[in-house]
Amino acid sequence: MPKKNDTPVSFETALNELEQIVSRLESGSLPLEEALGAFEQGIQLARQGQLKLQQAEQRVQILLNDDPESPLSPFTPDNESL
């Protein structure tokens, strides 16, 4: 079973890795244990990508805030890694 990657990767890198995993799984040529490991890694990458998209959406919402009196403050995500 593959080890869990502790260092967060960029959204683009995670998406590229996820696409490669999907291609390997769709080929149907992986043994069951390897397929399960690849699936698990794909789920982790998908969750990581989803978190990065949510953080980006929050940043956009902060920037588009209609209240001109609202003070700007640096964005600090609640959870920087999975």
Image (cartoon, rainbow, N blue to C red):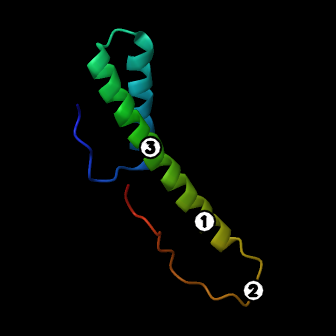
Question: Which labelled disc corresponds to residue 31?
Answer: none
> Residue 69's spot in the image, x, y percent?
73, 90
Quadrant position of the N terminus in the picture: top left
Nearest to N terminus: mark 2 or mark 1: 1
Q: Is residue 68 above or below residue 43?
A: below
Badge nearest the viewer, 1 or 3:
1
Residue 57's image quarter?
bottom right
Q: Which residue type does callout 2 highlight? A: Pro
Residue that carries the numbered disc 2 in the rendered image: 68
Residue at 30% in and 28% down: 37
Q: CA distance from mark 3 to mark 2?
A: 33 Å
The x, y position of residue 24, in whole percent, is: 38, 18
Q: Nearer the viewer, mark 2 or mark 1?
A: 1
Name the foreground residue: 37 vs 57. Answer: 37
> Position of 9 compared to 69: left or right?
left
Does residue 2 appear left or right of residue 48 in this picture?
left
Estimate the x, y position of residue 5 in percent, counting from the top left.
Answer: 27, 46
Residue under label 1: 58
Q: Residue furthest right?
A: 66
Look at the picture and state if 20 lies above or below 69: above
Q: Neighbour class for label 1 at 10 Å: few (<14), some, many (≥20)?
A: some
18 to 75, vertically: above or below: above
Q: Circle 2 sits in a helix, a strand or a loop, which is it?
A: loop
* Residue type pointed to by label 3: Glu
Q: Which residue is mark 3?
A: 12
**In which quadrant of the rendered image does the C terminus lie?**
bottom left
Amino acid at pointer 1: Gln
SS for dot 3: helix
